[in-house]
């Protein structure tokens, strides 16, 4: 039996080097858009930093995972605390579509796209991450988006996030299996 159902469904490989994850988020599209684009809101679930609201503008995401949950950062991941990703906005259609580049450890940058669709009083968020460098990058990205989106859902629902790193490391094992297949 698949324990990852509903708003904890696993992401899927939709094309070579591409992962897609969908979530239903509480609240209207405009609220979710603010949590994607405004640094003070985005830092509560992903990373802080400036993000341009036009194509060609800069994106700077500084990750502070230790501020997202109550569990300590494992030694293997402490090097990412305070790490900054720099990208460029490639599409921006407020409040329903946002894409930007994401640096990869080797080769060309990947690209992440957020699509927001109203569904009643809630929002369907589709995150598609393309041009990933390879298997390891796909596993890391899928595990990361899955875990970070869980934090976003907790925050939007007024709940405290617990066990960010426990969840991430469990998901890495699961995604290694499904992405290898």
Image: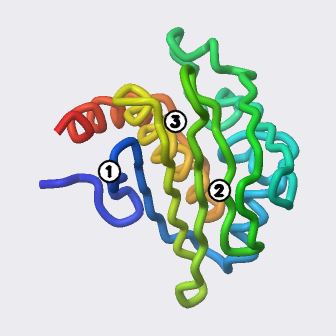
Residue beneath disc 1: 13
- Residue farthest left in this picture: 1
**Residue 120 visible (yes or no):** yes
Hey, which quadrant is residue 120 in on the image? bottom right
Q: Earlier in the sequence, mark 2 or mark 1?
A: 1
Label 3 to label 1, Cα distance in Å? Answer: 23 Å
Q: In the displayed structure, would residue 166 be above or below residue 8?
A: above
Q: Which residue occupies the foreground of this view, 73 or 58?
A: 58
On screen, residue 55 versus residue 98, left or right, reads right
Q: In the displayed structure, would residue 18 be above or below residue 122?
A: above
Q: Are marks 3 and 2 in contact (CB under 8 Å)?
A: no
Judging from the image, what secondary structure is the residue with disc 2 in?
Answer: helix
Q: Quadrant of the N terminus?
A: bottom left
Dot 1, how many residues are within 10 Å of its Cα: few (below 14), some (14-19), or many (20+)? some
Q: Earlier in the sequence, mark 3 or mark 1?
A: 1
Judging from the image, what secondary structure is the residue with disc 3 in?
Answer: helix
Label 3 to label 2, Cα distance in Å? Answer: 13 Å
On screen, residue 179 versus residue 102, left or right, reads left
Q: Which residue occupies the foreground of this view, 19 or 16?
A: 16
On screen, residue 62 versus residue 17, left or right, reads right
The residue sitting at 39% across, 30% down in the picture is: 134
């Amino acid at each position: 039996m698949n324990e990852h159902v509903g708003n904890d469904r696993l992401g899927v490989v939709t094309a070579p080097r591409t992962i897609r994850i969908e979530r239903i988020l509480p609240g209207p599209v405009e609220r979710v858009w603010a949590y994607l684009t405004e640094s003070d809101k985005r830092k509560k679930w992903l990373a802080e930093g400036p993000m341009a609201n036009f194509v060609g503008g800069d994106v700077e995401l500084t990750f502070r995972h230790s501020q997202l949950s109550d569990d300590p950062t494992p030694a293997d991941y402490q090097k990412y605390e305070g790490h900054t990703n720099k990208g460029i906005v490639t599409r921006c259609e407020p409040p329903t579509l946002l894409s930007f580049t994401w640096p990869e450890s080797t080769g060309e940058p990947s690209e992440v796209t957020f699509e927001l669709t109203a569904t009643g009083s809630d929002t369907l968020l589709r995150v598609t991450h393309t041009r990933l460098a390879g298997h390891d990058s796909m596993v890391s990205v899928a595990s990361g988006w899955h875990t970070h989106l869980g934090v976003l859902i907790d925050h939007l629902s007024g709940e405290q996030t617990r066990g960010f790193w426990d969840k991430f490391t469990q998901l890495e094992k699961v995604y290694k299996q499904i992405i290898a297949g």
